[in-house]
């Protein structure tokens, strides 16, 4: 447990010490609200490179900059993405959809950062800000006995009163459950395999993606040591279960060859430099993002397919919207006021629905099992995809719209 004294009452209690919870605490504190964080730190990991890496969008960079975290990130362990190359078939190097930071008129399309780097910088900012942190878990929540304040029961037996409880406790959110919000969840017929590779050819700051019968393969740029030839990339392969089993059972040499073939040889020889980790893929949505004295942020509110690398960026969008709702003259008001929470909920309705539609729609369109598209319609859908692909690939305006969506 963290050192005492810790409060028994706070304006805002943020439950969850993942990236979104930590950013929420910092953003709301900067908005002028007294905040207490409840959660355990990230467990240590002895991999030289964290297998969990995120593509952080320009909007996320703005948020992290605003809460004093962007410059605390270890820049030597981050890679910018200036180009995105998307291919409509595995092994293909043709007919790619090319999006660039230059065409989109932005500094970079994204920055690739390890979870450890991101969470470390957020934790450091939290320490500098001197916010109280309770190293504990939420066990129960009472929002009914007193309409003016919520009471949190922690696993240690400690109790804490708060006028607003922010649920940043991930997909299995205890806050969401205790607030009586429904959670709809659908499993994707895929598993995400994550690993890092050395590549014979440099990645030239490009993120590459292949869609096809074998699922969705993304190779994201990683920084390399200065004296190392070639490059390093991080893989996220959303593969059907049998293929995922097969890939996980492969030797390092076999896996390298398979990635080399799947990526059409653009990186030359590909060699694994980490173990392979697997993550289940699910689509989840809370029935509402707010309830009495409760607001949900991040995966506690919405869970997406990672094909667009946007799940956490969407969570950071929640953080920005919640801080915007509660800052300025509103900081003197009760942060759990129904009117303010509804304002937050309205602000997030469109961006969350749009991102869900895009990621779920793309997954279904390319799903090798048919993705709910009736069999006889499949050839027509495939032709429409090919046609749409070429139309987008040729249209500067459409590409700029796609970049604008990608960097939100
Ligand atoms: C393979 C893969 C690749 C991805 N790539 C990207 C990407 O490139 N870009 C991107 O934006 N997103 C990406 N995502 C999505 C991203 O990982 C999630 O959206 C993000 O981690 C959610 O952060 P969070 O803080 O909301 O939740 P979490 O990271 O799940 O954190 C929740 C925290 O709450 C704590 N907690 C849980 N229960 C309690 C409790 N009762 N009391 C106290 N604390 C509790 C947990 O211990 C944890 O610390 C990817 C996802 C996958 C699976």
Image (spheres, rainbow, N blue to C red):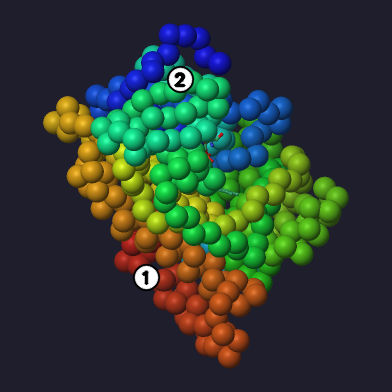
Indicate left or right for 372 with 342 as reference.
right
Which residue is located at x 60 percent, y 61 percent?
187
With respect to residue 90, does 104 lie above or below?
above
Mark 1: secondary structure: loop
The residues bearing labels 1 and 2 have C-alpha atoms spaced at a distance of 50 Å
Q: Quadrant of residue 233?
A: top right
Q: Position of residue 260 (x, y in %)?
A: 73, 57
Residue 84 location (% of width, % of height): 49, 55
CB at disc 1 and ligand 1 closer than 8 Å:
no
- Image spot of residue 99 (x, y percent): 44, 58
Left or right, residue 371 beside residue 175: right
Q: Nearer the viewer, residue 110 or 312?
A: 312
| Residue toward you, 70 or 30 | 30
Q: Residue at x 65, y 39 (%)?
A: 51
The numbered disc on residue 354 is none
Going by the picture, which residue comes out furthest to the front?
Answer: 145
Give the quarter of the image for residue 215.
Answer: bottom right
- Vertical comparison of 157 with 15: above or below: above
- Image quadrant where one finds the N terminus: top right
The residue depicted at 42 percent of the width and 65 percent of the height is 357
| Residue nearest the viewer, comparing 95 with 69 | 69
Residue drawn at the location 38% of the way across and 16% of the way down: 7
In the rendering, at what x and y percent does residue 336 appear?
27, 36
Between disc 1 and disc 2, whose residue precedes?
Answer: 2
Residue underneath mark 2:
133
Location of mark 1 (residue): 395
Q: Report if residue 42 is visible in the image.
A: yes
Q: Secondary structure at mark 2?
A: strand
- Mark 2: C-beta under 8 Å from nearest atom of ligand 1: no
- Mark 1 surroundings: few (<14), some (14-19) or many (≥20) residues within 10 A: few
Q: Is residue 380 above or below residue 389?
A: below
């Amino acid at each position: 447990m963290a050192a005492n004294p810790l409060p028994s009452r706070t304006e805002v209690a943020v439950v969850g010490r993942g990236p979104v919870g930590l950013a929420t605490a910092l953003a709301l504190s900067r908005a002028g609200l007294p905040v207490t964080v409840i959660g355990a730190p990230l467990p240590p990991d002895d991999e030289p490179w964290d297998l969990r890496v995120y593509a952080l969008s320009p909007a996320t960079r703005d948020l992290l900059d605003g809460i004093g975290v962007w410059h605390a990130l270890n820049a030597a362990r981050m890679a910018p993405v200036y180009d995105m190359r998307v291919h409509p078939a595995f092994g293909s190097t043709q007919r790619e959809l090319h999006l660039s930071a230059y065409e989109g008129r932005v500094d970079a399309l994204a920055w690739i950062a390890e979870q450890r780097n991101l969470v470390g910088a957020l934790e450091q900012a939290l320490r500098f800000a001197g916010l109280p942190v309770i190293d504990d878990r939420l066990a129960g929540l009472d929002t009914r006995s007193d309409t003016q304040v919520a009471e949190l029961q922690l696993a240690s037996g400690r109790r804490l009163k708060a006028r607003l409880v922010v649920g940043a406790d991930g997909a299995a959110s205890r806050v969401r459950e205790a607030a009586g919000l429904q959670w709809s969840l659908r499993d994707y017929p895929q598993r995400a395999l994550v690993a890092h590779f050395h590549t014979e050819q440099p990645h030239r700051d490009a993120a590459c993606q292949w869609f096809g019968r074998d699922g969705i393969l993304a190779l994201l740029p990683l920084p390399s040591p200065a004296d190392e030839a070639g490059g390093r990339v991080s893989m996220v392969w959303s593969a059907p279960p049998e293929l995922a089993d097969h890939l996980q059972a492969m030797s390092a040499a076999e896996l390298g060859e398979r990635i080399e073939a799947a990526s059409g040889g653009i990186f030359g020889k590909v060699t694994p430099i980490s173990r392979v980790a697997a993550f289940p893929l699910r689509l989840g949505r809370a029935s509402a993002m707010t309830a009495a004295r409760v607001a949900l942020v991040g995966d506690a509110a919405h869970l997406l397919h990672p094909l667009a690398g946007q799940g956490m960026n969407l969570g950071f969008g929640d953080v920005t919207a919640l801080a915007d709702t509660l800052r300025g003259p509103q900081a003197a008001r009760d942060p759990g006021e129904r009117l303010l929470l509804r304002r937050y909920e309205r602000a997030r309705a469109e961006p969350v629905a749009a991102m869900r539609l895009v990621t779920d729609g793309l997954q279904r369109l390319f799903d090798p099992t048919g993705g709910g598209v009736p069999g006889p319609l499949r050839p027509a859908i495939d032709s429409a995809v090919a046609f749409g692909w070429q139309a987008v690939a040729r249209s500067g305006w459409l590409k700029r719209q796609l970049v604008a969506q990608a960097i939100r």
